[in-house]
Amino acid sequence: MKKLLLLFALLGCSLSAPLMAEPTEHLSNEVKLAEFDKILLDSKVYIDLREERIAYLRGLLEMSGDPEQEYELLRRLFDEYYSYNFDAALEYGNRAVAVAGRMKNRKLISESNLGVAQLYTVAGMYAEAMGAFERVDTLALTPQSKSDYYKARIHYNRDFKEYSKDENMRSECDRKLGYYRQRLYDLPKKAGQAPERYRLDSLSTRLLEYYDKWDYANALDCAMKAVAMTNPTQHDYAIISYYVSMVYDELEDYDSQLDWLLRSATTDMRLAVKDHASLCMLASMRAQVDDVERAFRYIRASTDDAMFYNAKLRQWQVASRMNTIEDAYHKSVRQHQRANTHTTIAVSLLAAVLLVACIYVVLLLRRMAMTQNDLKSKNEEVVAVNNALKLTNKQLSELNLSIAEANMVKEEYIGLFLSMCSDYIDKIASMQRRVRKGIKSGSIAELNREFPSSDIIDAEKEHFYEVFDSAFLNLYPNFVDEFNALLEDDGKIELRKGERLNTELRIYALIRLGITDSSKIALLLHYSVNTIYNYRAKVKNRAKGNREDFEQVIRTLCSFKA
């Protein structure tokens, strides 16, 4: 028996795990409604979980041979069907009564009859419920079963009073309600303890007692204490949440009422409960705020569940609200149809106005097209003139830059020329004085030693190169770097320490200045024409790009920018 109970516990945990829900207290009611709509849409998932549990238990029942095991399985199936399907619950409840009778176990007979009585009460079958109550031997019940018994009796008398029209019967129900409530409140004292289940039963009973006496503050206090003892994976949570919504309805706090109805309905859906009231009440609330489409979906789902559960009381309760919501739905449809008709007329009139406007716009566009063609022709002429002016401006800018560069080169080299001429005049005068002095003194041999055949010429060439290098690099300081950028990596010119330009660079420096004739370059640098040709060919062979255009590119190095 203990092994079987452990198996039941494991089964319940494994199949209930997916039902856990995230807390939603921080969400707005509109968001909660959207979340509930998703849960309602996925209700088959939760139904399948319950069906899996039922199928598993039925499989165990078929293999069971022990009466005690059979009774426990029947009671477990009764519990599974209790809020899921009335007919199946009644079948397994009666079978449990029969098995308990065969075992002649007074406690089990009373407990199973109590379960059947509770089921009949929930279904509104009060005569059958009373018959089952009369078969319960309260002396054989455990304290917990007695708590269930008193709660069932309270439920029976409260519901019977609500639907009875006989004042004497209603008074009798009031008397019995007081009696069974007090017996329930006194039960923990007699048992010598107050287990949590007793506390929950007591709180939920006091909640309804305060509610019936219009003491909503105390009713709400009991409700919140009872909620704290449950969680959203328990059917008790759904029931107590529904009670909380009833209290908020009386307090006219409709946002809170909606919140707690959603909590109740969410737990009902996640537990695949078919015998519920919260969804039907949600449908009524949504209809009252003209959320008719959602109200209709909720009442249809509530009707389907009531038909599946097959208890006449619940079907009657849902049907009483169904007519009201259907009327609201049809009214909404008629309003939409009228609105659509008005919209169609308005759109038709607007279309006619737009047609006239379109004809006018087409005529206007034609006139504009003709004007635009004329403007386009004028614009093309203006663009052509502008392009010509831009080209002329560009040419003038380039010419101005060339003139500016030429002026700079001219100024630099005129200064250089005058400076060198002055130096040479001074040198010739100095030399003339030394020669005359030597001739007068007859020191011809000393003059020959002082002025050897080539030393003076070589020295003057080196001086010329230094002056030329300085003047050129002063004009074009980046010439060497830009020149090397045009050569292959292994052909770049590397200057020796202290050297500013070498022979190759001087040749191309003169080309950069516009002196391209080899004979003139040879004359200026004191080389033969062949030597100049060889240098030029040698450098061209090391060029990266097109060698034919190499010297043309050289003439643009270090150009002035606009």
Image: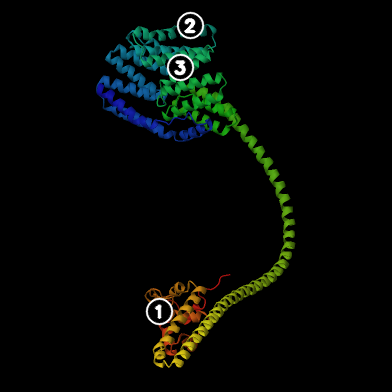
Question: Residue visible at 45% across and 14% down?
Answer: 205
Closer mark to the observer between disc 2 and disc 1: 1
Q: Nearer the viewer, residue 101 or 550?
A: 550
Give the quarter of the figure containing the N terminus: top left
Give the residue number, with chain letter if any, for mark 3: 125
Asked if one can make out residue 124 in the rendered structure from this viewpoint, the answer is no
Gap between marks 2 and 1, in whole Å?
A: 121 Å
Taking 290 as reference, is 558 above or below it? below
Near mark 1 (Cα within 10 A), the count class, few <14, some 14-19 or many ≥20, is: some
Gap between marks 3 and 1, in whole Å?
A: 112 Å
Give the quarter of the figure containing the C terminus: bottom right
Say which amino acid is labelled 1.
Answer: Arg
Say which amino acid is labelled 3.
Answer: Met
Near mark 3 (Cα within 10 A), the count class, few <14, some 14-19 or many ≥20, is: some
- Find residue 532 and report its horizontal and vertical position in percent: 44, 86
Q: Are marks 3 and 2 in contact (CB under 8 Å)?
A: no
- Find residue 345 and report its horizontal and vertical position in percent: 70, 43
Give the residue number, with chain letter if any, for mark 1: 542
- Colour approach in the figure: rainbow
Give the residue number, with chain letter if any, for mark 2: 175
Near mark 2 (Cα within 10 A), the count class, few <14, some 14-19 or many ≥20, is: few
